[in-house]
Image (cartoon, rainbow, N blue to C red):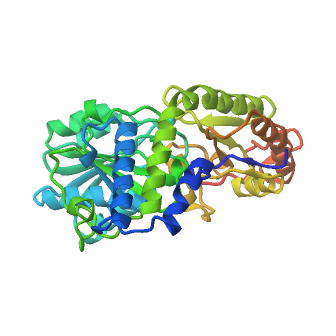
Amino acid sequence: MSSAYMDNNATTRVDPQVLETILPYFSEYYGNPSSMHSFGGDVGKRLEEARASVQALLGVEHDSEIIFTSCGTESDNTAILSALAIQPSRREIITSVVEHPAILSLCDHLERHEGYKVHYIPVDRLGRISMEAYAAALSEQVAVVSMMYANNETGTIFPVESMARMAKEKGALFHTDAVQAVGKIALNMQESAIDMLSLSGHKLHAPKGVGALYVRRGTRYRPMLRGGHQERGRRAGTENTTGIIALGLAADMALEHMEYENTVVRALRDRLEAGILAQVPYAFVNGDPEHRLPNTSSISFEYIEGEAILMLLSRVGIAASSGSACTSGSLEPSHVLRAMDIPYTAAHGTIRFSLSRETTEAEVDWVIAQTPPIVEQLRRLSPYWGANGPILTDNAFAPVYA
C-alpha cells in the first residue's frame, strides 16, 4: 500500500464509467443543446435524461424542478437571493454557525451591505443545532432559512425536515445545502417540506464545474443569471453539457450504491475510527454519533497541529483534510469546531477522514497503521506534551481562540 485517498468530502474521483461516457461529447457530439439541428438535438436529449436521473436520486416529483448550475456555491447563492427577491418586505435570514462559507460569506455580505438581519443558530458540543434558538428566531420577518443537510467536517445531520415544517408555519422559504448528503443518504423530496436544495457533482464522482438546484414546483423564483432561455429561463448560459451528462450518470450510480454507502462504507469508517482510537490516547471523534454521514470521520488529536499531521500523512501517501477544503490554508481552527466549543488544543489537531465507495479495507488499514506513529512523533515536539503525557500544571501554556 502506497497511498490512501481519504478526502472525498473535498472532492471525489470521477468514476471511470462516467469519464468514458462523456468523452465523446467533447469531440463527436459537441452540438449546442439549444440548436435545432441534430447535433444539438441529440445532446439536448441527453441533458433531459440527466435531469431525470437527478430527479430520481432526490426523489423529486417533476423533472422541471431540477435546475442545472455550475456548482454547489452557485446553487446556494441563487436559492437565497431568489428567496429574498420575491419577499422584499421580509428582511431577516436564518442560518447556522456551522454552514459552509458558500452560505456564511453571502449572509455576511447581505448583513453588512444590504441591511438584512441574519440569525446564526448555535450548535452544541456534538454539532447538533439548537432547536430552541431556531424556534425563537423564526418570525414572519424571516424570508428564508438556509440550513445544511449534513455538516461537511463532522458529518452531523441536521433535522431539516422538522425545521422546514416550522419555517412554513411562518411563511418562510426553506433551503438546504445538501452537497455532502446527496448520494450518501436516501432523500425523498416528494414527501419533504424543503423548498430548495443544492447539490454538487464532484462530491459524487462527477467532474467539477456542475451542480444543481432543486426548486419545488410552485415556489416563486428569481434567476441569478440572466441572458438566455436555458433551463426554462431560470439559469442563463450555455449548458455545461459534458458536466451535466456526467452528473446524470453519477446520480444513477449513487442511487445504485446507496445501500453500499450505508453498510460497507459505514463499516469501513467505523473500523478506521476504532483502529486509530485504540492506539492513540487523548483523541476523540467529533460529531453526533447517532446522526452522522456514513463516510465522514472527524478525529481530534490533542496537543498537536493538524497541519503537521496532514503533512506527515501526505508523506506516506495519505490524503486527508483539517477541515473544509474551501477554508484550507488558514491556521485558525475551523469555525465548525470552534462553534462546537471543542477545546483549542484539540480543535487545532483535528483531521477529517472522508471515505467513498471506492475506499478499500487495505486503505483503511494503511491509515490505521500510519497515523499513530505520526501522532506520537509530533507529540514529542509539542509544548503541551511532556514525558508522561499532557502538561496540565498551572504554569502550562494555555492557548485560547483569537
**Figure check: 276 above or below 305:** above
State whether residue 402 appears in this view: no
The quadrant of the picture occupied by the C terminus is bottom right
Q: Can you tell which quarter of the image residue 228 is in?
A: bottom left
From the viewer's perspective, tell me whether residue 153 is left or right of residue 59. Answer: right
Q: Name the outermost residue toward the left.
A: 89
Residue nearest the observer in this picture, 337 or 315: 315
Comparing 307 with 196, the one in front is: 196
Q: In the displayed image of the protein, which residue is found farthest to the right?
A: 387
Which residue is painted at 14% across and 58% down in the image? 86
**Image location of residue 307, percent across then percent down:** 71, 57
Query: Which residue is at the front of the view, 48 or 234?
Result: 48
Please state the horizontal and vertical placement of residue 310, each as a whole percent of the image.
Answer: 73, 54
- In this orientation, does residue 295 appear? yes
Front-lying residue, 105 or 7 = 7
Taking the view exactly as shown, the residue that stands out farthest to the front is: 38
Where 223 falls versus 383 (above or below)?
A: below
At horizontal 62% and vertical 38% (from top left) the residue drawn is 357
Q: Is residue 200 above or below residue 59?
A: below
Q: Residue 361: x percent and y percent?
A: 75, 33
| Residue 311 drawn at (x, y percent) | 77, 58
Residue farthest along the bottom direction in this orientation = 227
The quarter of the picture where the N terminus appears is top right
Residue pictured at 33% horizontal, 49% vertical: 95
Horizontal side of 215 relative to 21 (left or right) equals left
